[in-house]
Image (cartoon, rainbow, N blue to C red):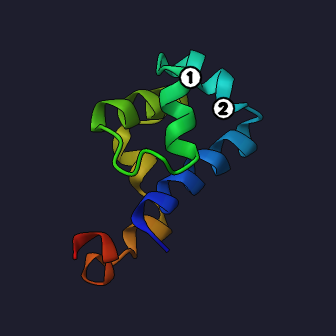
Amino acid sequence: MEYSEIYIRRIRQLCKERGIAINKLATMSDVKQSTLDNIVRGITKNPRVKTLHKVAIAFNMTLSEFLNFDELNDYSFDDDPEDD
């Protein structure tokens, strides 16, 4: 699994758990709809930390809470094809 797929899953999972549509998340986070769409569709592979921070705040989380989950914590950059 690619690194970008991990945080896409995180965003989708949190939206599902909290009953928030992606367009509503865009409004809540003050992130452009097109930017958020590009992230969750995998077009934007490396979103800015500022963007992820805004998304985290919309979920009422700190950035560290948003990024602290098993799939991401267990990810190994040694196996990342994007770094080749």
Q: Is residue 76 above or below residue 50?
A: below
Q: Is residue 16 left or right of residue 59?
A: right
The picture quadrant where one finds residue 78 is: bottom left
Q: Characterize the local packing of mark 1: few (<14), some (14-19) or many (20 or more) Cα atoms within 10 angstroms.
A: some
Residue 84 image position (x, y, % from top left): 22, 76
Tell which residue pokes out farthest to the right in this image.
Answer: 19
Label 1 close to label 2 by CB (< 8 Å):
yes
Q: Secondary structure at mark 1?
A: helix
Q: Which residue is mark 2?
A: 22
Q: Which residue is mark 1?
A: 33
Q: Is residue 12 above or below residue 59?
A: below
The picture quadrant where one finds residue 72 is: bottom left
Camera-side residue of 75 and 18? 75
- Name which residue lies at 57% across and 45% down: 40
- Name which residue lies at 51% across and 38% down: 38
Q: Nearer the viewer, mark 1 or mark 2?
A: 1
Could you tell me the amino acid type at mark 2?
Ile
Q: Is residue 67 above or below residue 28?
A: below
Residue 79 image position (x, y, % from top left): 31, 83
Q: Is residue 5 left or right of residue 63?
A: right
| Mark closest to the chain's N terminus, 1 or 2 | 2
